[in-house]
Amino acid sequence: MLVITLVSYIGAKFHRPKIIGAGVLLMGIGTLLMASPHFIMGRYKYGTAATHTNDAGNFTVISTCSSDSQKTLQQPYSGCRKEEAESSPLWVIVVLGNTMLGIGEASIIPLGMSFVDDYARPENSAFYIGCLNTIKGIGPIFGFVLGSLCANLYVDIGLVNKESVTITPQDSRWVGAWWLGYVVSGLLTLLAAFPFWFLPKALPENSQISLLDNTPQQHITTPSLTEIVKDFAPTFKRLLTNKIYILYLAYSIVAFNDFAILVTYTPKYLEQQFGQSASKANFLIGVTCVPAVALGVFLSGLMMKRFKWGLLASARVNLLNIVATVFLTVPFFALSCENLDIAGVTVPYQGSTEVQGVTSDVLPPCNADCGCPDLHWDPVCGENGVTYISPCHAGCSSTQGAGRNMTFHDCRCIQSWGLSVGNSSAVLGQCSQNPNCNRMMYLYLGLQSLALFVYSLGAVPLFTMSLRIVDPELKSLSVGVLLLSIRVLGGIPAPIYFGALVDSSCLKWGQRKSCGRGACRIYDIETFRFLFQGLTNCLRVLACSLLWIATIWIKRKMQNDKQISKDMEMQRGPSDDPEHEDTVK
């Protein structure tokens, strides 16, 4: 955000491939830096009310319902432990690495795409840009698959005994090996930086540049930095006085808000709506949605090369694609599962007349004398198919086994559902969703992949619009301002304001040791669904309206330009100049 406009404008005057190479090198260093806190900080300690391990690695039960456990349970939650507040300064390293990543990335798209557009033949430019965007879409496939594998591995893999980890990837307290993906991608990025240093400043075939400037390639000189800086203000003013470009910018900002919400919250949406783990959600997105986008982008480049779409045709194709996408996503409002049955959260305890809020002081008779800490989250699944906040909340008084295989027995709250003593046990973890939920999820993924494919068919025409609605010498700057605007007004605020909306649907909050509010443990999936689908569809409708207005303006401009050319030709009249007709054309 800080450098993209200057890099787009100044970088276009110098050796673009080398500037891109330096940016990619900086990206690799920043990516590796983001992984470094894992090797500095201590091991991850997740809160658990069910079991803990002593120094010898043996399990000790501390959360069953018995008179001996009440003092043990109450003591950790009797007050806030400020001295154990999470105040590690290592997040600064992550921010610094991410900043380096962003600065390095700033040069790739504006300088790279303009370089390709400058030196490709006009009829091939859109196809090449489509190929680049397709490859750019293939990258996230590997990213999501790698992320899925890393999320399925415990964060301290190799440092802890697997048997001592009592939670699974489906648990909201699970933290995967987040750092491993940064190490792999950082090393690969460093390798990708070197080829750019061996590319020439200009390619031998100067196709599109030669159409605008007949100056021989060897006589082109690089202007001084002073001249470039001096010319920045009037050049920037020329760009911002282009009404069609400003409208295109507004459309792109709205569309990127939709895109940022989808990218950020689709994994969480799959986790909450269909009961999937973070690992599986990432994997499913990587093998369904991302390939659909990559294929759509590639075909859009082919179609633009085949049909030779101009500026107006590109705008119309994008408009049609957005309208089709809106209609394809309407069924998403009905595709979901029901909320899990969680005692005291989504369903009442048996024998209660109403749902007891988890923060209520009123406890049901089956666990009223257990002294259960409501602010802790260590769910167990009872044989009655109901999830309980902890074994204590289920009224369990005995255990068998250890680790993930531990079972809890003589659970009074489960017995209150009419089950016999022998069937009143519970196991660690939340209860599974209805088997029909998986079929619903695959239907959702299929429709979403189709919608993303249709939307991506307009990707290359949309990008080439940003290159065609401005003067040729403003191409790099126009792309830079576009990327700056969509990130400042889309990529940054969208996840924040939508995250606040999602938080409003939380049913059960965790708590930090420092008394601050922790992570949300369970959401009202119906409210989450309507917020997610409703907001994204509203953004698409708004983007569609802006693009429709832009299409009208482009059509009027083309008609005006045609009329002006016709009037100029009539004023000049016939000419003996043999180059007259070529000049008019």
Image (tube, helix red, strand yellow):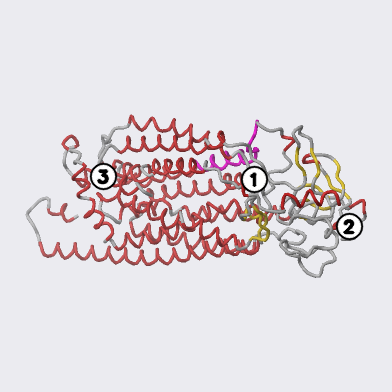
Q: Amino acid at mark 1?
A: Lys
Provide the residue designation for mark 1.
Answer: 280
Residue 540: x and y in percent read 48, 62
Task: Give SS at disc 3.
Answer: helix
Of the numbered discs in the image, which one, if any, rests on residue 507? none
Task: Give SS at disc 1.
Answer: helix
Provide the residue designation for mark 2.
Answer: 415
- Please tell me whether mark 2 or mark 1 is closer to you in this view: 2
Q: Earlier in the sequence, mark 3 or mark 2?
A: 3
Q: Amino acid at mark 3?
A: Gln
Q: Earlier in the sequence, mark 2 or mark 1?
A: 1
Question: How many angstroms separate mark 3 from mark 2 (CA)?
Answer: 79 Å
Question: How many angstroms separate mark 2 from mark 1 (CA)?
Answer: 34 Å
Decide: few, some or many residues near mark 1? Use Cα within 10 Å; few <14, some 14-19, many ≥20. many
Instruction: State which region is magenta.
Output: 139-158
Provide the residue designation for mark 3.
Answer: 208
| Residue 288 appears left or right of 46 | left
> Relative to 51, does residue 335 appear above or below in the rendering?
below
- Residue at the image position 57 percent from the left and 38 percent from the top: 146
- Residue at the image position 50 percent from the left and 61 percent from the top: 324
Residue 272: x and y in percent read 65, 55
Task: Give SS at disc 2.
Answer: helix
Question: How many angstroms separate mark 3 from mark 1 (CA)?
Answer: 47 Å
Decide: few, some or many residues near mark 3? Use Cα within 10 Å; few <14, some 14-19, many ≥20. some
Residue 203: x and y in percent read 28, 35
Q: Nearer the viewer, residue 11 or 55?
A: 55
